[in-house]
Amino acid sequence: MSAGNSPTLLLLPTLPAARQPDGSIVLTEKFVEGVEAFAEFWPGPVEVVFREVQQPTDNLDNKAYRIEDLSFGAATADFDDAAAMSTYLGRCSIALGGLTNEQTHLARLAAQLGTPFVYTTEYSLKTRLQIARVEVRNVLRRARRCLWEWNLERRQRTALEEASGVQCNGTPTYDQYHEVAANSLLFFDTRLRAEHLCTHEEQAARLSTYGQRPLQLAFSGRLKEMKGVDHLVPFAEQLRSLGVDFRLDIFGDGVLKDDIAADIKKRGLEDIVFLPGNLDFQTKLLPRIKNEVDLFVACHRQGDPSCTYLETFGCGVPIAGYANEAFSGLLDRSVAGVKVPMDDLSALGAAVAELSADPERLTRMSRAALRFAELNTCEITFQRRTEHLLELSRNSRRVNA
């Protein structure tokens, strides 16, 4: 994986690749854009080795790619195959992997080969336990899942101690791991480039009509319980009972779509709550949120550092949501929203009703959201991540020289 003296970056993503009958692999557009962003700033080849699976993930931006059409090198491998992984790790300058069950052993293997290895983290133990409580109904199975997560946490901490560094997506894992691992970097993942951000003129046009029309609310993402989407319709009913003049659009698709549609009808909310479906992110969803949405509603039941937060801020739109780890961490660094206790629908409704009656506060939050996004664009974020990896690679070369 080397090209002359140019350093090679090896990516070992947590995203698996599902191979199709025609030989193509299913990846998310978000992931491909991320690799392309690394390649933009990395001064040498970028290679990706995926763990191969039979079924693709349920991500809304899945797409089949022919390996030969990708702008970076790609291959699949069994991460437990020591010989194969030694080959990949032995011929790169630095490797960036994910802190998952499948990769906790790789930092040690890389160290034996003299290759610096950096982990990317997203889900804290608290968040993983929250996901287990939502996804696993059976009490015994849930207890086993939680025990498994605790055991995994011990192995992850050992792996971080063996690694050359860690890049933490969001504050939850940064707060948890930056003292465990050497060379920690905090970043906020997004695919919004500067050119995609809401302009100050677009924002000003929208802000000028606050208080003169119904409050425009929105949610976008996978329609699944983990994202708290089952709370959106009861939230809307409560907001109506508080006398708020509003409209709520629930963008996206997922297993709960039909249940949400039935709940809208059952509660008689068809005139104010809508399911527009899964819109193309760049051409339809972004313009809609930039120009029409006043406030994003995030009922996320766990601290997943979702791109949704930064991408919403990039549209100049503040967020009202549950105080999970990720959202709370963002609001510690920006006043671009309001948080309420987890699962407290009454508090969420009251907070949004309060904001609807205070256009000046909503305006301040909107401007703060855009300022935060301007400091954390895709270009800025990936340049920082690349510089961090380059420095660790140079340090390793100096030590091994």
Image (cartoon, rainbow, N blue to C red):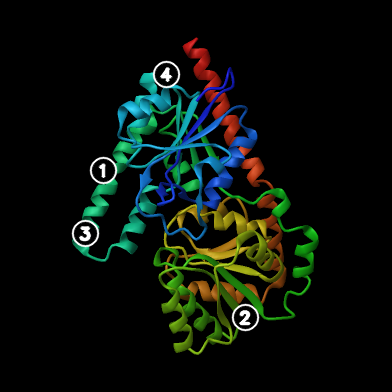
Quick one: 362 or 252, which is closer to the camera?
Answer: 252
Q: Does residue 86 sit above or below 225 in this rendering? A: above
Indicate the secondary structure of the residue bearing disc 4: loop
Say whether marks 4 and 2 touch (CB < 8 Å): no
* Cα–Cα gap, marks 1 and 4: 28 Å
> What amino acid does circle 3 point to?
Arg
Label 1 vs 4, first from the N-terminus: 4
Indicate the secondary structure of the residue bearing disc 1: helix
**Foreground tag (4 vs 2):** 4
Say whether marks 4 and 3 touch (CB < 8 Å): no
Residue 321 coordinates in the image, percent (x, y) = 52, 65
Q: Residue furthest left?
A: 140
Label 4 vs 2, first from the N-terminus: 4
Which residue corresponds to mark 2? 246
* Cα–Cα gap, marks 4 and 3: 41 Å
Residue 112 coordinates in the image, percent (x, y) = 36, 20
Residue at figure coordinates x 66%, y 70% from the top left: 293
Residue at figure coordinates x 52%, y 76% from the top left: 349
Say whether marks 3 and 2 touch (CB < 8 Å): no
> What amino acid does circle 2 point to?
Phe
